[in-house]
Amino acid sequence: MTDHTRHDFERFTGPNPGGEAEYAAAVADGYDNGRLPIGVVLEVSGSGSQIALDLQRLNECMEDTDPSIALAGQVGSQIKIRVGDAWLLASVRDQRKDRRTEGGIIAHIDFLGEGGEEKLTGRINAFKRGVTRYPIPGSLIYPTTTQDLEQIYASDGRASISIGRVFPTKDIRAGLYIDAMLGKHFALLGSTGTGKSTSAALILHRICEAAPKGHIVMIDPHGEYSAAFRQTGQILDVSNLQMPYWLMNFEEHCEVLLTGSGNDRQVDADILAKCLLGARTKNRLAQTMGKITVDSPIPYLLSDLGNIIQDEMGKLDKATSSAPFMRIKGKLDEIKADPRYQFMFSGMLVGDTMADFIGKVFRMPGNGKPISIIDVSGVPSDITSTVVAVLSRLVFDFAIWGREEKNRPVLLVCEEAHRYVPNEKNAD
């Protein structure tokens, strides 16, 4: 930092004896950019802060041999703020020119976590996520060094997978803790073309390597992942998925079989509920269960459903319209005749059991292939959401009803999940 730069910098901080001491110590050590401030905190909020950066200092840092210091203050880089005897780490979100000060830059940062300070070197150690102490306006901002990043991203011994290197370094391992990540919902977000699918494939490959007896179900709407997992996974598409239609609950049956709207749809739904329950009741399994509902996953014949609809229509008096029955029967016949729906609405599937289908989709046993890729690109668009809903519900129901048995967690991965997740404000 030149004398001229120091004077410019004081326009942000005012006279700062602590900053002068830092400057003197850094110069004595051979002009260490990592120990010289590059900005100051202007205001603080719960999750981030507004800061002022000195353009001259950023230009000086760009010439540093440490790649982390060379990137200091730029969008996406990480900076640190001294808070008492600790360091607060933050990521630079955006920048704009400060029109009030020549050579000044205004930026917003997001807090990442905090760590202690090594007494001899001043570097970060014992880093942890979250913030317990916030900086105050006027606190100085410093570049994050490669040595800092080594401490921040160091493994604590928990089971983890390696997914690359921490940018901008070339030798710091970037890892993910498997149990912590898979123990909750998580998402990969980014703009088109930023590598979301590539990242997802990499993470899933690493998980398969770490847990070869795991159970992973991936819903692939565009057929992008078949090639990536052909050797390590089971590829299921419309040619071999053979998904039993009777697994659908009543709401999903309505999505597939009902074409009416408004009041007509409610009338059709009442008729379908009565006829579907009758079709399920014909199965011998239903007779052993005592009481079943229209949602019970009891196999039934499509022909039985059609015959019951026809019988109910025959019981009508002349004053009652047969149009609702004709709409349902017509849609059912259309689906049975359309080859695009044969992967699901095939008469042969009535002999399948829940255990057979779950074993195939959930990889139980996995036989060395812990992931099943369900390619729904060939599924008719009008029932794609229903197919995904059935698969997702099966994962949830399996976890709920299997709590008393051996723990077998299943990872469900949805590519382009926004296509299936409801966008209503109060959606469950």
Image (cartoon, rainbow, N blue to C red):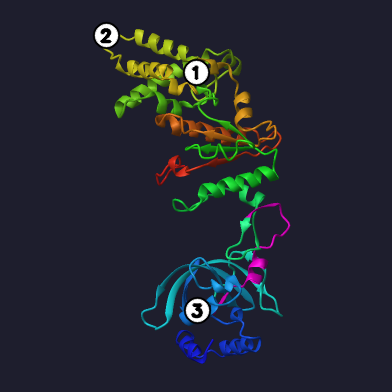
Tag 1 residue = 346
Which span of residues is magenta-colored? 138-163
Q: Amino acid at mark 2?
A: Lys
Q: Amino acid at mark 1?
A: Ser
Decide if residue 218 is in sight here: yes
Q: Which residue is mark 2?
A: 318
Magenta stretch contains residue 146: yes
Foreground tag (1 vs 3): 3
Look at the numbered discs 2 and 3 and tell me whether their residues touch, using CB distance below 8 Å: no
- On the image, the x and y values in percent for residue 357 come to 60, 26
Residue linked to disc 3? 59
Helix, strand or loop under label 2 = loop
Disc 1 crowd, CA 10 A, few/some/many (<14, 14-19, 20+): some
Residue 264, by quadrant, is top left
The answer to whether the residue labelled 2 contacts the one labelled 1, judged by CB atoms less than 8 Å apart, is no
Residue 121 in the figure: left or right of residue 385? right
